[in-house]
Image (cartoon, rainbow, N blue to C red):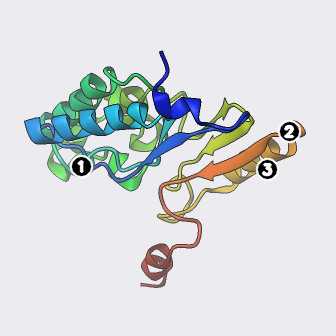
Amino acid sequence: SPPAAAAARPPGALRIAHLTDIHLEDTPVARRGLAHCLAAANEAGAEAIINTGDTFMRLDGVGRDKVEPQLRAWREVAAGSALPIHSCLGNHDLRIPPAAERAAAAGHPGLEKGGRADALAALGMPAGWHAVTLGRWRFLLCDSTAGASRYAFGPEQLAWIEAQLAALPAGTHACLCTHVPIQSPGAWMWMVN
């Protein structure tokens, strides 16, 4: 049965839980903390969880022996969630092996899609950017690492966003979800330097 918090919701309202920058490591404390967070979202009456990236502590520049435990920790803890979890990628979710392993890792399926394949599979994402409809809301889950510069959408994703917005049915709201904020002083400073 739905949590008591859901009963007080006005008709047509939607309650989501927003998580970001989880930076999950495979430790007992991190696993318990994430499980507690997911359970609290359910107890608060959320209908879904929106996770806006940096789910993993670090997939980039570390060996496969450090990547697999992080992916496994997410899969195992997220599998216990009573709520659906819809994710987008953050910069910590991209996988580029350390220089010493690149030749041996060439062709590994986890490195496909610009280093995104491992995270896409672990997070259950159909693609680097995708949309989900919850009630009267269309959530556009974007990849803020997909452009030519470090924090950008790129022309293909921008065209997708425009098409999604143009196709919204009357009475449907849109929410653009991205790891790096659209107006981010940090992203601006990185580009200047």
Q: Which residue is mark 2?
A: 167
Q: Position of residue 39 (x, y in %)?
A: 33, 31
Residue under numbered circle 3: 162
Tag 3: amino acid: Glu
Instruction: List x then y, in percent, for residue 92.
Output: 33, 52
Q: Residue at x 49, y 55 (%)?
A: 145
Instruction: Say which quarter of the image contains residue 135.
Output: top right
Q: Specify the amino acid type for callout 1.
A: Met
Instruction: Find the distance from the CA under tag 3 to the CA under tag 2.
Output: 9 Å
| Residue 7 seen by the camera | yes
The vertical placement of 187 against 88, above or below, is below
- Whether residue 11 is situated above or below residue 191 in the rendered picture: above
* Secondary element type, mark 2: loop
Report the residue marked by disc 1. 57
Q: Give left or right: position of 89 versus 11.
A: left
Q: CA distance from mark 3 to mark 1?
A: 32 Å
The amino acid on which the numbered mark 2 sits, given as a three-letter code, is Ala
